[in-house]
Amino acid sequence: MRGTLRGEPRVVRVAAAQMGPINREHARENVVARLCALLHRAADCGAHLVVFPELALTTFFPRWFVDDISEVDHYYERDVPSPVTAPLFSCARERRVGFCLGYAELTSEGHRYNTQVLVDRDGAIIAKYRKIHIPGHASNEPSRKFQHAERYYFEPSGEGFGVWNAFGGRIGMMICNDRRWPESYREMGLQGVELILCGYNTPVNYLPDPSQDRLAGFHNSLVMQSGAYQNGTFVVGVAKGGCEEGVDSLAESQIIAPSGEILAKTVGNGDEVIVADCDLEWCKNYQNTLFDLDYYRRPEAYVRSQHQRGPRTRADGSPLL
Ligand code: CDV
């Protein structure tokens, strides 16, 4: 009979450090001071790892369009750590707390990515992930109340979803819109992921279809809980919430178990820390039973998933191969 074969507990105490708004005029130094304060709060709770939101160093600048992209170069980091972000790395070293941080990256070759790094308890970067599913639009849409021009400001990563040995387990990362796609979780599931870290900025008003607005929180939990359960992994989703520059963003940061249950969830939409003990051995209850991927998956039946982007049908609705 297939069983869980759980070993000795491997507990990572994980903190989700939700942030409230960052406005345009907020200096990077002040934002880093806020991040340090959150890291100290997490450390006071005994956390080993603290997860910050997507684009945690700046306002969510894709909500404005500029014709000359170089005008917004100041929102991007050329180096991390840099003199301005170094204090966060020092805090991490001093408190022996690792962290995961999202920011806009401008490479020396001129590429622009929406990026997240994983930093160990010695303050050293051990992994970098660049966002793959870039939502929104690529040109100015003046009829919108606000822009979501991520497809103008960022290129999609071609590096795929990595999983790294860290914090005594298998850690993966994804960023915001990635969490809505089952492929993100499954790519990491196939590398034995046990803990997925995800920062997000999710406007509550989805302008292309306002009927979804009332469901923003439901959809947020729905995708992360199902991704966790279907791959037997913990998922940590961390928001930059509240009303930032007139745009309301979803909070509801949460830490989800491999059972799909929510272990901790924020109650407000400002700076707030929640903590959960994540015993990575719990993943085995699912990865060695119902979701034993090696035993039960049927990749030979999933013929379209790898190469086909969207539905392809003939006029009569029959599938096109
Ligand atoms: N930053 C994001 O990726 N936001 C998207 C919005 C545009 C839907 C999200 O999936 O939450």
Image (tube, rainbow, N blue to C red):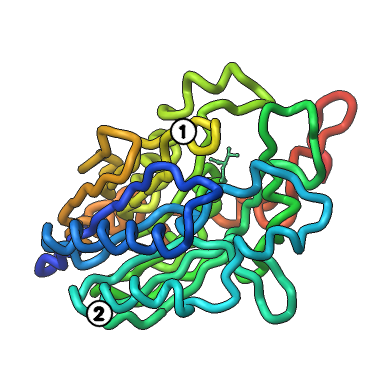
Q: In this view, does 198 lie to the left or right of 149?
A: left
Q: Residue at x 17, y 59 (%)?
A: 279
Q: What residue type is labelled 2?
A: Arg
The answer to whether residue 174 of the structure is visible from this angle is no
At label 2, counting other C-alpha atoms closer than 10 Å, the crowd grade (few under 14, some 14-19, many 20 or more) is some
Whether 1 is drawn above or below 260: the answer is below
The image position of residue 62, as x and y in percent, is: 65, 47
Left or right of 242 on screen, residue 207 = right
Mark sitting on residue 186: none
Considering the numbered disc 2 on the image, is that residue within a helix, a strand or a loop? helix
Asked whether mark 1 lies closer than 8 Å to ligand 1, one says no
Looking at the rendering, in which quadrant would you find the N terminus? bottom left
Q: Where is residue 165 in the image (x, y as percent from the top left)?
A: 34, 77
Question: What's the amino acid at mark 1?
Answer: Cys
Can you tell which quarter of the image residue 163 is in? bottom left
Residue displayed at 41% across by 58% down: 31
Q: Can residue 143 be seen in this snapshot?
A: yes
Please tell me which of labels 2 and 1 falls first in the chain. 2
Comparing 192 with 82, the one in front is: 82
What crowding class fits label 1: few (fewer than 14 Cα within 10 Å), some (14-19), or many (20 or more)? some
Q: Distance between the residues labelled 2 and 1?
A: 32 Å
Q: Residue 20 in the image: x percent, y percent?
A: 38, 42
The reply to whether discs 2 and 1 touch (Cβ–Cβ < 8 Å) is no
Image coordinates for residue 108, horizontal then vertical, percent: 69, 81
Q: Name the residue under label 1.
A: 243
Q: Ligand 1 quadrant? A: top right
At x 68%, y 64%, the residue is: 73
Q: Is mark 2 within 8 Å of ligand 1?
A: no
Q: Name the residue under label 2.
A: 93
- Per the image, label 1 sits on a secondary structure element best described as strand
Mark 2 or 1: the one toward you: 1
Q: In this view, does 31 lie to the left or right of 319?
A: left
